[in-house]
Amino acid sequence: MKSTRHCFLFAIAVFAWMGSGSIHAPRLTADDRPNFILLMGDDHGWDEVGYNGHPHVRTPVLDEMAATGLRFDRFYAAHPSCSPTRGSVMTGRHPNRYGTFAPGYSIRPEEITVAKLLQDSGYVCGHFGKWHLGPVKASSPTSPLAMGFHEALSHDNFFELNPWLSHNGGPPQQYAGESSQIIVDQAIAFLQTAKQQDQPFLLVIWFGSPHEPYSGLPADLALYDNLPAQYEQQQVALTSNETGRPTKRSRRAVLRERYAEITAMDRSIGTLRTWLTNNHLRDNTLVWYCGDNGTSADGIVTSPFRGQKGNHYEGGVRVPGIIEWPHAINQPRATDANTVTSDILPTLCDLANIPLPARPLDGISLRAIFEQPMWERPKPICFWTFNSTLDKQREPYLTPDDQRGTTPLVKLIGNLKTRNFSNYRHPIVRDTDTSGTRVILDNRFKLIVTGHGDNTTRELYDVRKDAAEQSNLVDRRAEVAAQLASQLEAWQHSVLNSLTGADYEESAQ
């Protein structure tokens, strides 16, 4: 463990930027603490909103938020898939630090979440919708309640119409209706209690939409009856709502249902905003919407970016991002600065005047961006899809029962209607652990590294000029690639040190 600790100190010295610097600005008084609402769409890519020019999908509420609040034009998910990105929101840390490598990998119980931090500061915290960081049952050490929430109506994974949800970790119950509206209506009941008790609140709503398989209400489907005929000739793979197994359908039919889900989600956000207005909470409630990764392959028709959900090109990690907070953002503005889901925890802590956890963070506070639209990110963002096939011979972090899910969903795995989770202990770092696709993005250039050893390949893109990532500059800008590669390697060593559990040991001392 000595060598591990030395590695940790070295990485911190080399890579101090990852730690967490809050940007200093005048502090709010205790009486002025803002409320926070975090909204997240499931597989909702950057272009699938009206305000980014989508030719088909209708999102009038998100469009209004983007037109009146703070619009992030370069907002990134910390990972190109769902569980890892959700972990980054909760912790302000890259998910590889605690073994949330891919969908279905749980968080670790020792992680300090934004809900725990706000709860300790007097906030009442509620989670509604998709969790996907471990089972939501009451006995799970990684359930919403175990990770800092007072109230939860949650699902282990995604859900469609008439979803099965668990209230405060209890046995799953089926709720009749459109899923986005259901969880917003239930969340409003939570907000009513918080208002009656005069408590500041953190509300996290993670929608099950628009993840496949798709379904929609008749009125929402009818909005998309006239999609271009060219989509009818294209076949896409997805899950059958009838059998729960893989099928192929025309893209036109699939898009009709997908867009209906996005519109229904958008409408439910409107319901929430109206309630905040009617209850005089809108002004000092920060509402933050984003996606968890790029659009899935079945839904891509208009993206200007290369890639999709599951890879690290812009189409896989760039997502919609909006903040609405009239108290601090009383004029519409947009920012072209690089921002990421890992920034959410540091930003909320900064605004609530709460100290950050004493462990490496990958996000930074975005507080200054509210006053400085031309703010430029001081340090790079790093991404990394860990080669999790290397980890499955290790000791499980939690027992099989702790990781067994309970809430049914349409999509089957084998004959299983629920989802189980994994996480593994990683006491020793191996040379091959640095493999897997890894990326570093500074304010202009993006370096993508794949492979290991002699089989390593590099791609370098100037994403400010080449958003579609078509022109690989790795040879022409070799000095930039080398500098970024060195920073990326130092960051990986810090992440691997966290993965061993060293951060928990440091916190215990």
Image (cartoon, helix red, strand yellow):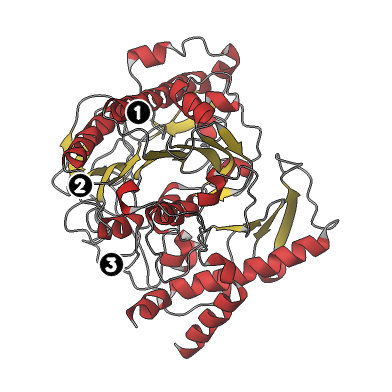
Residue 273 disc label: 1
The three-letter code of the residue at mark 1 reads: Arg
The three-letter code of the residue at mark 2 reads: Glu
Residue 341: x and y in percent read 48, 50
Which is closer to the viewer, label 3 or label 2? 2
What is the C-alpha distance between the residues marked 3 and 2? 24 Å
Is residue 14 toward the left or the right of residue 240 in the image? right
Residue 151 disc label: 2
- Front-most of residues 453 and 38: 38
Is residue 337 toward the left or the right of residue 3 in the image? right
Residue 296 disc label: none
The three-letter code of the residue at mark 3 reads: Leu
Position above or below: 181 against 390: above
Position above or below: 295 against 62: below
| C-beta proximity under 8 Å, tags 3 and 2 | no
Residue 45: x and y in percent read 52, 36
What is the C-alpha distance between the residues marked 3 and 1? 39 Å
Residue lying at 51% horizontally and 31% vertically, measured from the top left = 298
Numbered disc 2: secondary structure: strand
User: Label 3 belongs to which residue?
Assistant: 398
Residue lying at 48% horizontally and 60% vertically, measured from the top left = 94
Residue lying at 67% horizontally and 60% vertically, measured from the top left = 449
Instruction: Sort mark 3 into few (<14), some (14-19) or many (20+) by Cα contacts within 10 Å.
Output: some
Residue lying at 20% horizontally and 47% vertically, measured from the top left = 151
Instruction: Sort mark 1 into few (<14), some (14-19) or many (20+) by Cα contacts within 10 Å.
Output: some
Can residue 508 be spotted in the picture?
Answer: yes
Is residue 462 toward the left or the right of residue 426 in the image? right
